Image (cartoon, grey):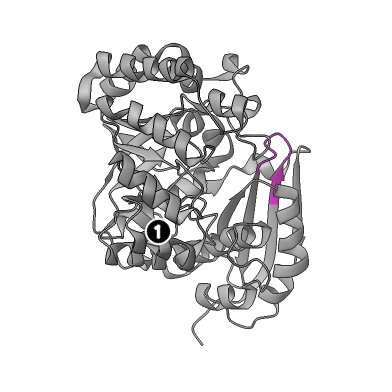
Amino acid sequence: MNGIKVVKVETIRPLSHPSSLWIQLHDDQGNVGLGETFFSQSVIEEYVHKIAAPIILNTPLINPELMNFLLRPYVGFQGGGIEVRAIGGLDIALWDLWGKRRGATLSELLGGQVHADLDVYNTCAGNGYMSKTASQSPQNWGLENTEKLKYDDLNGFLQRPKELARDLFDSGITGMKIWPFDFAAERTRGTNISKSEIESGLKIVSDIREEVGMDMNLMIELHGLWNRPSAEIIMNSLEEFSPYWIEDPLRPDSVDAINILRSNTGMRIALGETSVGRREVLPLLQSGAIDYLTLDIQWTGGLTEARKMASLADTFAIPIAPHDCTGPVSLATSTHFSLSQPNGFLQETCRAFIYSWYEEFTEGIPKIKGGKISVNQEPGHGVTLKEWLFSSPDVIIRTSE
């Protein structure tokens, strides 16, 4: 059998950033593959060492397809819970290790680059956004930590939308994602939105259009927080501003409602970051409810599943734009992945993350220049952890051998 002998499974858990967990797989030739997960770090750490590591270490030769088969959970396999996200991190690490063994980049392992580079858009978060818990509440947005930010893009779109849009546009980035209606969803739990709340959100959008015109691709994120009538009101109110897409207007398992919403608004819908695997995406594709698939490679179980999802989407002529607000390894993996897929066309980035905690923890992050992202040609995904992590008292290192 063609595979790798894994001799050590290692997790790296930084206490200062309690949503991130890195996983390293060591082979019998001294190579190391790096994976990553986001949210529930200590629980995933426990799963990796108690459940996954004994299976991986006791398999004579392992490869990504075999590992996914051996670790496939029976209960809840359709949900992006602890098991699936742990498998996602392990799968990325194994693909990276495979690349190190072969001296090949991830995009080469996936068949080679179809694209030399990709356009990016900027998700307008700040350094502390979603860093503590998985909650979408504004209390978890990190709005109070502005003194630590190199790019304060969340406060930027809320308070200085013209200035932010101009800065992005002049840097070559012609796509930006904002979520100006989330405060209203917080107030009503997604059941209703007032006229004044609509007008407040539209003022942000209008300011951006006034400053940079229609050449800025404007993505409006709704975070799946709304019921269908409210989402429809919001989307119809945005029509005059021609958003590039509306992202996650409803939960992804509300397939019939999403289809009705799309029909009633005529707007392009991007969805899929919280959809898990081919089986969960297929109904969305079959119904014609979505226009862009924003799969998250970590959360859907890794590259092994993501490449099948991309191929399935391509069957329906749907482009992919992988989600990334979850870490430097995810960004590199997603970029290699999209470069290798015929329907890869756009990569999400978050400059407030890239130039703060991504750089703090790792090296080898993909380069962005003139609104385009490209990968280095190091084997695997090219990202490595900085050495200080392995000697810091504020980082928990755990191994299974």
Q: Which residues are magenta?
A: 12-19
Q: Amino acid at mark 1?
A: Leu
Which of the 4 image quarters holds residue 178? top left
Secondary structure, magenta segment, majority class: loop
**Which residue is more in the foreground, 70 or 315?**
315
Q: Residue at x 27, y 30 (%)?
A: 174
Figure check: 217 above or below 299: above
Is 313 on the left-hand or right-hand side of 85? left
Query: In the image, residue 34 lies at what x, y percent?
Result: 56, 56
Can residue 401 be seen in this snapshot?
no
Is 142 on the left-hand or right-hand side of 199? right
Is 389 on the left-hand or right-hand side of 383? right
Query: In the image, residue 154 lies at what x, y percent?
Result: 49, 22
Residue 45 magenta-drawn? no
Q: Residue at x 45, y 67 (%)?
A: 278
* Quadrant occupied by the C terminus: bottom right
Figure check: 240 above or below 323: above
Q: Residue furthest bottom?
A: 1
Q: Which residue is identified by label 1?
A: 284
Query: In the image, residue 32 lies at what x, y percent?
Result: 57, 61
**Which residue is more in the foreground, 236 or 183?**
236
Q: Secondary structure at mark 1?
A: helix
Query: In the image, residue 169 lies at what x, y percent?
Result: 28, 23
